Image (tube, grey):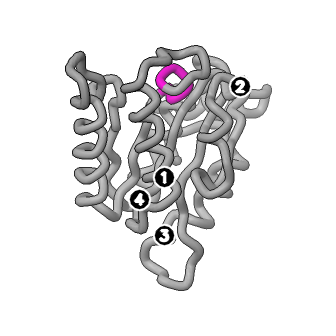
Amino acid sequence: FNDLGGFKEFKEWFNLRKFWHLDPKFPKQKGVILYGPSGVGKSLCASCLGNEAELPLYRFDLTKIYNQFVGQSESNMRQALNAIESVAPAIIWVEEINRLFADNAQSHTAHNQVLALFLEWLQEHDKDIFIVATANKIDQIPAELMRPGRFNSKYEAEYPNQDERAEIFLLHSVK
């Protein structure tokens, strides 16, 4: 976070939770959705979380799940989720989740099955996995993905105000 200007409220929120995996009494953390317009630093913010929590950060590219053969997309998703669980504790970054699970996305069976598998896993997994998902348009994310129990919070990333712009400028002009 030392190299990330702005995001003050989010940094405070995450700093209170970043060592959740070390304290068995701390409430389980599922993750967060960072949403807002392109270019405000959502991906940069997401990429900082591993360092802040002193955990490995892995990028989960959902586009590589889909396959043209019947049943293969679902199998790929199961394998990916098993692989994610095997690296716990960790932070998993899902970039532009709104594009992959948008209401207006493919409506074929494989897409629906992959979404169902992901939703069930988000709700049910018991590993120390924190998901950080970024999205440009939160209204394009299916409502079932936004239900309580799947993510701990949503954070709207906005264009930086004057003070935040000055902070960002100083961070990058010093280097």
Task: Residue type at mark 3: give it.
Answer: Phe
Give the CA separation, mark 1 to mark 3. Answer: 20 Å
**First in residue order: circle 4 vs circle 2:** 4
View extreme (bottom): residue: 25
Q: Is residue 114 left or right of residue 5?
A: left
- Mark 3 neighbour density, 10 Å: few (under 14) some (14–19) many (20 or more): some
Q: Which residues are magenta?
A: 96-100
Tell me where residue 16 appears, x and y as whole percent. 62, 66
Is any part of residue 169 visible from this angle?
Answer: no
Label 2 belongs to which residue?
139
Q: Nearer the viewer, residue 119 or 52?
A: 119
Work out how far the residue at label 3 is from the one at label 4, CA to CA, in angstroms: 12 Å
Task: Identify the mark nearer the N-term, 1 or 3.
Answer: 3
Q: Which residue is mark 1?
A: 122
Q: Which residue in the protein does label 3 denote?
A: 19
Reading the image, the residue beneath label 4 is: 129
Q: Name the secondary structure under disc 1.
A: helix
